[in-house]
Image (cartoon, helix red, strand yellow):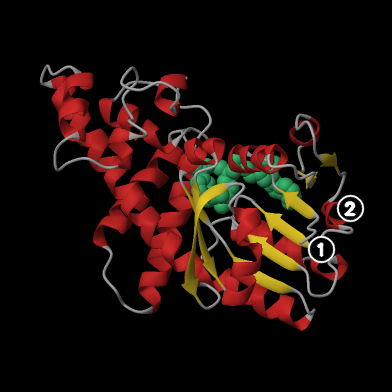
Amino acid sequence: PNSNVAFIGLGQMGTRMVNNLIKHGKQPRVYDVVPSAVSSIKGAIPCSSAEEAVDGANIIITMLPNGQIVKDTVIGQKGILKKIGKNSLLLDSSTTGPQVARELYQAAKESSVRFLDAPVSGGVVGAQAGTLCFMVGGDEGDCKEVEPVLLHMGAKVLFCGDSGAGQITKLCNNLILGVTMIGTAEAMNLGVKLGLDPKLLSDVVNISTGRSWSSDTYNPVPGVMENVPSAKNYDGGFSVELIAKDLGLAGDAALSISAPVPLAAMSHQLFRTMITYGLGKKDFSVIYKFLEGKAVD
Ligand code: NAD
C-alpha cells in the first residue's frame, strides 16, 4: 500500500535509518532541531518543523533522545498529534520506557491515531546495515501492517504484546547490554594490564563463554575492531547519557514491582559517574578508558 513516511530525529540512529528507507525507494519527510542534520540527508524531503514533516504522512516515526522530548514533540504545546491524519500510524522508536508509551498510546487513541512503541536494538552498526531488531508493543494488526516499512530499516520485527511491551523488552535487553559492556571492559582492562594482547584476549573470549555483543561486535578496546566507536576515539555510537537513561528506566520499572536489579543499579551509577567526568556524549564503550584511568579527548 502507499505510504508516506515522516521521520523526526536525525541523530546517530535516525540518520542511518532514514538512509535505509531512501535506499528502499521511500522519500521520507524529515525533521530535526539541528538544521544541518536535515540538510545532510540526500533523497529525503527536508522540513523545517515537526508539524511540516507530518503533513500528508500516514506513517510517522520518531527517533528522539528521551521520553520527555518525545512527549513534547507529540502531545506538547506544538505537538504533532493534532496535525496527524486520522487512522495514521505513529511509531516511537526511541527508548522511553513503558509509561511514556502507554500515555502516548492513550492520547493517540483519543485522536483516532494508531500508536506503536517500536524501540530498536542493534546500535549504529545495525542501523547502518539495516539489520535492526524492532520490539513492538500495541495492537498486533498495526504491527503487521507497518512491518514491511520497518523491514527496510531492520532485519526483524518482533511483536511483544500490549502497549509498552516493546519498551519493556528493550529495557531488559539494555540492562544486559550495560552490564556486559562493563564486564567486558573490566576484564579486558585487567587482561591488558596483566600483559595480554587485547586482540588475542578478545579472540579467545569470542569463542568462549565470556562472549557477548559487547565483545564480538562492539569491542571497547581501541585497535581490536574497525568501524566501532572505540576505533574512533569513542565518538558517535550510543552515548553514556543514553545508556544511563535506559538503566534508570529499568530501575524505575523494577521498583514499580519490587524486583531486585542490583547490577542494573550499579551500572546506572557507574555510567552516571562517567557523565560527571565529562564523558556523557562519548560512546558508552568508553567505560574501558574510564577503568583504564586515562584521559579521553
Ligand atoms: P542522538 O542524540 O544521536 O539523536 C537524537 C536526535 O534528536 C538528535 O539529532 C537531536 O538533534 C534530535 N532532537 C532532539 N530534540 C528534538 C526535537 N524536539 N525535535 C526534533 N529533533 C530533536 O540519539 P540516538 O543515539 O540516535 O538515539 C535515539 C534514541 O534511540 C534514544 O532514545 C536512544 O536511547 C535509542 N537508541 C539508541 C541506540 C544507539 O546505539 N545510539 C540504539 C538503540 C536505541
Q: Residues within 10 Å of mark 1 (few under 14, many from 20)?
A: many
Q: Residue at coordinates 29% horizontally, 53% vertically from top-left? A: 266
Q: From mark 1 to mark 2, how far is it between C-alphas?
A: 9 Å
Type of amino acid under label 1 = Ile
Q: Secondary structure at mark 2?
A: helix
Left or right of residue 295, residue 196 in this image: left
Which residue is pictured at 71% across the width and 65% down the height? 90
Disc 1: which residue:
80
- Give coordinates of residue 218: x percent, y percent: 37, 33
Q: Residues within 10 Å of mark 2 (few under 14, many from 20)?
A: some
Q: Residue 123, percent across and down?
A: 48, 42
Asked whether the viewer can see residue 280, the reply is: no
Residue 123, compared with residue 188, is above or below; it is below
Q: Residue at x 33, y 21 (%)?
A: 294
Q: Amino acid at mark 2?
A: Glu
Image quadrant occupied by the N terminus: bottom right
Reading the image, the residue beneath label 2 is 52
Q: Against 257, is 287 above or below?
A: above
Image coordinates of residue 63 in percent, x first then y, are: 64, 51
